[in-house]
Structures are given as structure tokens and as C-alpha cells.
């Protein structure tokens, strides 16, 4: 992959945006074929099967996840250790489901930057540094920041770095 491929991906995304479209489009046909990688697809189908999954902050979505097939069930920690009933609900004040769906911006959540920070995250979108709430937290602070505040924000996001 080179810069031309990245620019082509951006061009195709902008074109879809302007046309009001939203679909999967291959911006890398030199290496990615329409039918995918048949050997890899066969392997995935041998090891995994589609199942319903409960998504943190959103809830259950039918046929949205994977689980190991019966042939590999002995490697499935959920099955092997009888792990059931894991609850992934966020605290009531957390609106990460709405953030994940693009319905609100992180700053519209009352807990943002007050009771919810990267050091004390309430929801999935503040837990990881790639999460929308964590990114807003970091860059909002950096926007109005002095070099010292910027460094403090970075250290808060990566305490061991
Ligand atoms: S700021 Fe925290 S509490 Fe609010 S939606 Fe994001 S993760 Fe949830």
C-alpha cells in the first residue's frame, strides 16, 4: 500500500459522501480482489461461525459477532470455563452507546471530563485511547493548551509512556 492507495480511499469516501451513499468499496484492487482471499475465507469459515453479540454501550445485535465452531469448541474460553452471564452494561450516566452511533458528541455527555476521564473511564469510548470520548478529551485539552497542559494530557492518556 502506498500514498496513492490512501488518497484513492479518501477520494472514494468523499465521492460517496457527496452522493449520499454508504457502501463497501474497494480502493485497493491491485491487491484486494472482489471475492477476497479464498484460502483465508475457508479457514475463517472452518474456525468461526456467526452469532448474536452484545455490544458494550449498544446492546445486543443479531448476527453481529463470531464464535468458535464446534470443531474448535475446546478452545472457547466461554465454553471451557463455563463463563456465562457477562454483563457489559455501562453506568446509567454513560451515553457511550449514543456516541458510538454518532447521535451525540462526547462533550454532550454530562460526565465527560468530570466523573469520566481516561484515568477513571465510565464507558468503552473513554477506556481506549482510540475511543471517541478519550480522543475528544485529549484534543479538547490540547486545543486551548499550553505546552505544559499538552504534556500533562498526553501523560494522562499514556501513563507508562
Ligand atoms: S464521556 Fe464517559 S460517561 Fe460520557 S459517554 Fe463517554 S465514556 Fe460514557
Image: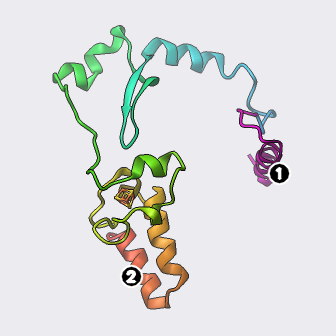
Q: Residue 19: within the magenta?
A: yes
- Rendering coords of residue 84 (x, y %): 19, 25
Tell me: 85 left or right of 4.
Answer: left
Image point (80%, 52%), residue name: 7
Answer yes or no: is residue 150 visible.
Answer: yes
In-front residue for pair 46/84: 84
Report the span colored magenta.
1-25
Q: Which SS does the magenta portion mostly show?
A: helix
Image point (83%, 42%), residue name: 19
Q: Earlier in the sequence, mark 2 or mark 1?
A: 1
- Rendering coords of residue 112 (x, y %): 38, 66
- Rendering coords of residue 28 (x, y %): 77, 38
The local secondary structure at tag 2 comes to: helix
Q: Which residue is mark 1?
A: 4
Q: Residues within 10 Å of mark 1 (few under 14, many from 20)?
A: few
Report the quarter where the C terminus lies.
bottom left
Please tell me in which quarter of the rendered image ligand 1 is found. Answer: bottom left
In-front residue for pair 142/93: 93
Number of numbered discs visible in the structure rendering: 2
Image point (47%, 83%), residue name: 150
Mark 2 CB within 8 Å of ligand 1: no
Q: Quadrant of residue 49?
A: top left
Distance of mark 2 from mark 1, alpha carbons? 36 Å
Give the residue furthest to the top: 71
Q: Residue 70: within the magenta?
A: no
Answer yes or no: is residue 130 visible.
Answer: no
Q: Which mark is residue 152?
A: 2
Mark 1 CB within 8 Å of ligand 1: no
Amino acid at each position: 500500500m502506498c500514498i496513492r492507495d490512501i488518497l484513492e480511499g479518501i477520494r472514494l469516501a468523499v465521492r460517496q459522501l457527496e452522493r449520499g451513499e454508504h457502501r463497501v468499496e474497494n480502493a485497493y484492487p491491485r491487491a484486494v480482489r472482489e471475492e477476497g482471499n479464498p484460502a483465508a475465507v475457508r479457514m475463517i469459515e472452518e474456525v468461526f461461525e456467526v452469532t448474536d453479540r452484545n455490544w458494550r454501550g449498544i446492546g445486543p445485535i443479531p448476527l453481529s459477532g463470531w464464535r468458535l465452531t464446534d470443531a474448535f469448541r475446546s478452545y472457547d474460553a466461554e465454553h471451557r470455563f463455563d463463563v456465562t452471564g457477562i454483563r457489559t452494561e455501562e453506568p446509567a450516566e454513560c451515553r457511550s452507546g449514543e456516541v458510538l452511533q454518532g447521535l451525540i458528541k462526547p462533550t454532550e455527555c454530562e460526565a465527560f471530563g468530570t466523573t469520566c476521564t481516561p484515568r477513571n473511564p465510565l464507558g468503552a469510548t473513554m477506556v481506549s485511547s482510540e475511543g471517541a470520548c478519550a480522543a475528544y478529551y485529549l484534543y479538547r485539552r490540547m486545543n486551548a493548551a499550553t505546552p505544559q497542559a499538552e504534556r500533562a494530557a498526553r501523560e494522562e492518556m499514556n501513563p507508562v509512556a
